Image (spheres, rainbow, N blue to C red):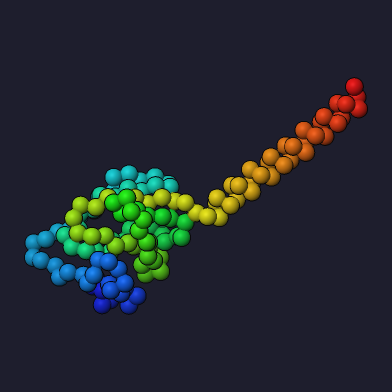
Amino acid sequence: MTHETLPWWKPSRYSHGEPEQPTHGSTSSAKITRYESEYISIDAAPVRNALLVLGEKYYQGWRATVDGKNAEIYPVNYVLRGFTCNRGLTGIEFFFDPLPFKIGKWLTLVSFAFFARCGAGMWIRQTRREG
């Protein structure tokens, strides 16, 4: 697939520049080294600057790093995740870090603390009345 078949792909927007033409006998490789529900690690060795597509659903809660630097994840064909990587050995990591989950977690903890405090206050008042 070349960048002409991806109408949204504008190589000039990225530091990688224009895609290089493939050379005969060159092969790129990518290997998933760790796969968990909220973490994916990939070792890739593209022979040229590339758009690597991961066959997983695109969701904005995922974050990616390429060689330890934050990388943008692009929706590919409206469904899959894609990202750019430079030629050479590259370490890619995906982390599931959704903002709605963080907000929900903190709201739950705050409400739990509030109701625990209310319950403790009621219990203290009740024991004082009885005693």
Q: Is residue 18 left or right of residue 36?
A: left
Report which quarter residue 115 is drawn in: top right
Q: Position of residue 121 (x, y in %)?
A: 80, 34
Q: Position of residue 91 (x, y in %)?
A: 27, 50
Q: In the displayed image of the protein, which residue is found farthest to the left? A: 24
Q: Position of residue 45 (x, y in %)?
A: 20, 54
Q: Is residue 113 left or right of residue 25?
A: right
Q: Is residue 37 left or right of residue 24?
A: right
- Look at 21% across and 70% down and name the residue there: 19
- Look at 63% across and 43% down and name the residue there: 109
Q: Position of residue 123 (x, y in %)?
A: 81, 31
The front one of 80 and 103 is 103
- The quarter of the rendered structure image containing the N terminus is bottom left
Q: In the displayed image of the protein, which residue is found farthest to the top? A: 131
The front one of 31 and 62 is 62
The front one of 29 and 47 is 47
Task: Count the labels in the image.
Answer: 0
- Look at 19% across and 59% down and name the residue there: 87
User: Would residue 55 be seen by someone viewing this image from the given angle?
Assistant: no
- The quarter of the rendered structure image containing the C terminus is top right
